Amino acid sequence: MISKSRLDGKFGKYGGKFIPETLVPAIEELESGYEKYCTQRSFREELESLLKNYAGRPTPLYYAKNLSRYVGGAKILLKREDLLHGGAHKINNTLGQALLAKKMNKKRIIAETGAGQHGVATAIACAVLGLNAEIYMGSIDMSRQKMNVFRMELLGGKVHPVKSGTQTLKDAINDALRDWITNVNNTYYLLGSAVGPHPYPTIVRDFQSVIGREIKQQMLEALHRLPSAIIACVGGGSNSIGSFHQFINESNVLLYGVEAGGKGIRSGEHSASLCAGSEGILHGMKSYLLQDEFGQILGTHSVSAGLDYPAVGPEHAYLKDTKRVRYVACNDDDAVDAFLLLCRYEGIIPALESSHAVSYAMKIAKKMNSSDSVVVTLSGRGDKDMDIIMDYTKPGTRKNKRDDRKT
């Protein structure tokens, strides 16, 4: 179920371990701990029990017939990660890593968060496993995700506001790494996405690959065939790599990763590192980054806090170069329109992150036949985004599209 990590931590030329010497012992301890515990049957059984009886797996694969009828073309199916405890796919990884930390006798857990979903999931996992959680979050993200900040604190987590740099996810990761360097002996860094130095991209991918395994099984049971395409949003890339991993060798299944196009690629106000970035090193890994000609990290923008990150996981960089996955960008307006449409046609309120994938799925489905099927990983629910949507859709703020419902 859980693969052994790559010895060199590389995905082609991407990945690796670009870390200060002070972190080498902690990374080596993490790698050996992962190899030791995650291959043990008892660990797998305990994690599977938590995922089933506590988190709520398996999640449904729902045929969105109303949205499919509205769009026309292929059937659109939603992998309902939004129905998990905590409201997002993040708990797949936090339960896995928190359990690993407990086996490694680490009582203090630190994490970073953007939209707050990883922070909430970390606080949940630490509460149920009896660990202490401290979460770093950019001040800007805290202001636009106040409810998630309150949820983290309610669950026993301590939230550290990050006021340096852009005050978003990039800077939250920076501060979490500084904390880890200072407190390596008693602290476990529970990284939330498939980024960072080896072995984090592999660990997160392995814990999130339950999404793709279930999609494959559920498609074969329901339609007796694999989907024509799988679509997921990409920030750091955890829900998408978890969705794609089981299908990398299934050449008949198209894979699409949807980045945050913000106000448009040409505007420069976006978070599309794969579509508009270049190779570089950030947060201990080599991958695609948004940077200037001097290697300085550029500012990012997205209506969704969870996609507001200037880099991407190294496995995604490899999959881009090998052309196994096609990466595209969805702008803010289109993501909000998809958010509103899914609410209206299916009674499902998606996270703004997931709405980027829903938007592109509608474009793809329209070009396909009715015998085709498109699976969208609905990575989280949109309760956290209500204030953003209310502000975004105020009269005069933007041109709202009001499509009449097709019958």
Image: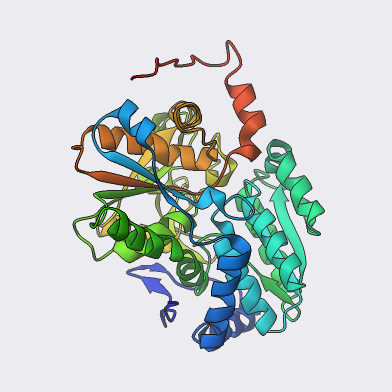
Give the residue drawn at x 73%, y 68%.
128
The foreground one among 176 and 361 is 361
User: Would residue 163 be seen by someone viewing this image from the given angle?
Assistant: no
Q: Position of residue 179 (x, y in %)?
A: 73, 66
Please tell me whether residue 396 is drawn above or below residue 67 in the rendered image: above
The foreground one among 208 and 48 is 48
Residue 261 relative to residue 306: left or right? left
Q: Position of residue 40 (x, y in %)?
A: 52, 88
Please tell me whether residue 331 is drawn above or below residue 159 in the rendered image: above
Please tell me whether residue 36 is drawn above or below residue 137 in the rendered image: below
Give the residue drawn at x 66%, y 77%.
101
Give the residue drawn at x 66%, y 49%.
116
Render colour scheme? rainbow
Q: Position of residue 233 (x, y in %)?
A: 44, 46
The foreground one among 99 and 265 is 99
Residue 6 relative to residue 173: left or right? left
Q: In which quadrant of the rendered image does the C terminus lie?
A: top left
Residue 84 relative to residue 129: left or right? left
User: Would residue 146 be seen by someone viewing this image from the given angle?
Assistant: yes
Give the residue drawn at x 42%, y 83%.
7
Count of labels shown?
A: 0
Q: Quadrant of residue 4?
A: bottom left
Q: In which quadrant of the rendered image does the N terminus lie?
A: bottom left
Q: Position of residue 13 (x, y in %)?
A: 34, 68
Q: Residue furthest top?
A: 396
